[in-house]
Amino acid sequence: MNQAELLRYVVETLDTLGIDYMVSGSHASIYYGEPRMTQDIDVVADVTLAHLPALLERFAAPEFYVSEEAARDATATRGQFNIIHSLTGLKIDIVVRKDTPYHQVEFDRRWRQPLLPGIEAYFARPEDVILNKLLYFQQGGSERHLRDIAGMLRVSGPEIDTRYIGDWARGLGVGDIWQAVRRRAETT
């Protein structure tokens, strides 16, 4: 199974189980920006404890590894858990949707877009991908997030609502980082 096949399986599983989700992280930034290698698939999902038995059944051993305990804990605390494809080592990060005002708005804004021929998936909007990359940069300092943002601005810039980003960036405490990234993108 390659990464595209795994992403397709994840999306089809979540759709079939009626679990609201959105593709986020690197796959979403690649969708709106420039290609790069990534080893994981990030999906924000509104997973509940009632969903877990069916979800774990679809990602059962030996093809997959997922800790039921970690999944239950993440669901209860609105954290995240991993699903690993045993043969390839590819990883799916399931981030349980957080219950903050911003994360509610972000999730409400998701939209269905083409994923592969004949398959659509819910994606985070580009503005929300950028905001999350700003938050991740603030937490960990990885330049990779800033490169992803710059790539998104180069490829999808005219379609990106920078006012929305600016408003939320200030509210989320990453306004200074956003301004620096914009200046950097304008000069390159």
Image: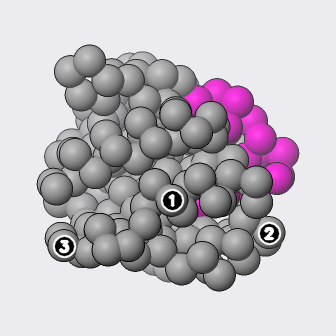
Q: Earlier in the sequence, mark 2 or mark 1?
A: 1
Q: Position of residue 165 (x, y in %)?
A: 60, 38
Please tell me whether residue 28 is drawn above or below residue 68 in the rendered image. Answer: above
* Cα–Cα gap, marks 3 and 1: 18 Å
Q: Is residue 105 magenta?
A: yes
Q: Position of residue 104 (x, y in %)?
A: 77, 41
Badge 1 is on which residue?
57
Q: Position of residue 53 (x, y in %)?
A: 64, 60
Nearest-to-viewer mark from 2 and 1 = 1
Badge 2 is on which residue?
76
Q: Is residue 137 magenta?
A: no
Q: Residue at x 54, y 62 (%)?
A: 56
User: Which residue occupies the foreground of this view, 115 or 60?
Assistant: 60
Q: Residues within 10 Å of mark 3 (few under 14, many from 20)?
A: few
Image quarter of the N terminus? bottom left
Image quadrant where residue 18 sits: top right
Q: Residues within 10 Å of mark 1 (few under 14, many from 20)?
A: few
Nearest-to-viewer mark from 3 and 1 = 1
Identify the magenta region. Answer: 95-110
Q: Is residue 23 left or right of residue 18?
A: left
Find numbered disc 1 in the image and state the secondary structure of the residue it sits on. Answer: helix
Nearest-to-viewer mark from 3 and 2 = 3
Look at label 2 and name its amino acid.
Ala
Q: Residue at x 82, y 52 (%)?
A: 100
Please tell me whether residue 44 is drawn above or below residue 141 in the rendered image. Answer: above
Q: Is residue 60 left or right of residue 185?
A: right
Q: Residue at x 19, y 73 (%)?
A: 87
* Cα–Cα gap, marks 3 and 2: 29 Å
Q: Which mark is residue 87?
A: 3
Q: Is residue 123 visible?
A: yes
Q: Residue at x 43, y 30 (%)?
A: 121
Image quadrant where residue 83 sits: bottom left
